[in-house]
């Protein structure tokens, strides 16, 4: 494991009592690892990282044999895991289960934390965990060549099948705060948007060709891809908004973690979601009109595109109602 003792956890989660036994927290370390880290970086790469960790004793710091970028990556992942661990552990630490069932602890000279204080701490713990994991994933994406296990994992390579294949690229069109977690959450909706909105207009063969542009650059196809991607991003956002719990703020869109209580407290309201969905659809339609115009221009130059395909798009009037077809 990335964290193997109470001192390991306390190094990143400072308010943890040094008297807390690791046996109490170990199940939550395992749970948080499987729930948050494995889906993000893959079990093979996680196992590769743990080979550089020497466990000394349950009451002392583990010895970490990392240097440079790998040391920075480990620190970010370990810190995020510490916060995720406490996020999972906190609701249970005041309870004990025995032969008489589940009981609530009542310690002399100690009082339960007030609910609003607990909620604020839980919210901050979740946000810190998410942001630390995002920072680790951003580092991984930037220095992928240094991490063979990561680069060869499904978590890294699966995006190559999409027209928008990276966090940075999606962030150009939708402000996801450069969050790879957000990109991973939106990836199924990018695929859905390609199938529902892009392929019917450009054709499956041309869409497949556009995804291979890095291997064989083509000026006209590059121009077409540049016009498709903003529309694709907005269509994906429109499809995702009803499903994904999001925080919508001045700094952009943040995907919430899987804790149901935090989702219900922090998720954007229905009216915010509806407004953003309407805006996304309007922008997507406008971008798509540019795509169709580019297709017409490209066909006129004799480029090998589906010139005989009847291109249609529904253009809204100023009330967003469909008024005519082009």
Image: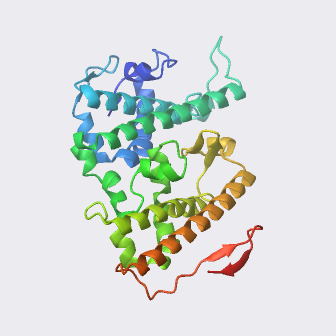
**Residue at the location (48% across, 18% down)?**
14
- Which residue occupies the extreme top position in the image? 109
Q: Quadrant of the C terminus?
A: bottom right
Q: Does 322 sit left or right of 263 as displayed?
A: right
Colour scheme of the rendered structure: rainbow
Residue 219 in the image: above or below residue 264: below
**Residue at the location (51% across, 70% down)?**
291
**Residue at the location (33% across, 71% down)?**
209
Q: Does 295 sit left or right of 278 as displayed?
A: left
Residue 87 in the image: above or below residue 271: above
Residue 264 in the image: above or below residue 196: above
State the residue in front, 247 or 60.
247
**Residue at the location (55% across, 31% down)?**
125
Residue 243, quarter of picture: bottom right
State the residue in front, 291 or 192.
291
**Residue 226 visible here:** yes
Q: Quadrant of the N terminus?
A: top left
| Number of marks | 0
- Which residue occupies the extreme front position in the image? 301
**Residue 98 visible here:** no
x then y, percent, for residue 261 = 64, 42
x then y, percent, for residue 113 = 67, 22
State the residue in front, 159 or 106.
159
- Which residue occupies the extreme bottom position in the image? 308
x then y, percent, for residue 164 = 42, 58
- Which residue occupies the extreme right position in the image? 319
x then y, percent, for residue 136 = 39, 36
């Amino acid at each position: 494991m990335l964290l193997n003792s109470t001192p390991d956890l306390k190094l990143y989660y400072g308010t943890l009592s040094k008297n807390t036994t690791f046996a109490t927290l170990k199940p939550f370390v395992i749970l948080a690892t499987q729930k948050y880290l494995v889906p993000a970086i893959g079990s093979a790469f996680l196992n590769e990282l743990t080979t550089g960790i020497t466990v000394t004793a349950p009451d002392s710091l583990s010895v970490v044999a990392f240097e440079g970028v790998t040391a920075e990556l480990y620190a970010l992942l370990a810190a995020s895991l510490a916060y995720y661990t406490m996020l999972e552990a906190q609701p249970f630490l005041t309870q004990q289960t025995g032969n008489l069932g589940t009981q609530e602890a009542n310690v002399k000279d100690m009082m339960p934390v007030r609910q609003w204080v607990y909620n604020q701490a839980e919210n901050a713990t979740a946000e810190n965990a998410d942001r630390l994991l995002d920072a680790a994933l951003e580092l991984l994406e930037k220095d992928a060549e240094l991490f063979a296990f990561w680069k060869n994992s499904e978590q890294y390579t699966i995006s190559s099948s999409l027209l928008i294949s990276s966090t940075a690229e999606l962030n150009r069109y939708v402000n996801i705060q450069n969050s790879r977690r957000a990109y991973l959450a939106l990836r199924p909706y990018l695929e859905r948007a390609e199938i529902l909105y892009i392929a019917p207009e450009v054709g499956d063969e041309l869409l497949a060709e556009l995804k291979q542009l890095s291997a064989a650059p083509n000026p006209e196809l590059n121009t077409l891809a540049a016009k498709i991607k903003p529309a694709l991003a907005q269509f994906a956002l429109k499809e995702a908004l009803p499903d994904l719990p999001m925080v919508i703020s001045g700094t952009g869109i943040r995907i919430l973690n899987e804790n149901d209580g935090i989702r219900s407290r922090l998720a954007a309201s229905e009216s915010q979601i509806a407004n953003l969905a309407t805006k996304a659809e309007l922008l997507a339609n406008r971008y798509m009109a540019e795509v169709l115009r580019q297709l017409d221009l490209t066909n006129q130059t004799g480029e090998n595109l589906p010139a005989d395909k009847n291109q249609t798009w529904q253009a809204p009037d100023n009330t967003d109602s469909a008024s005519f077809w082009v």
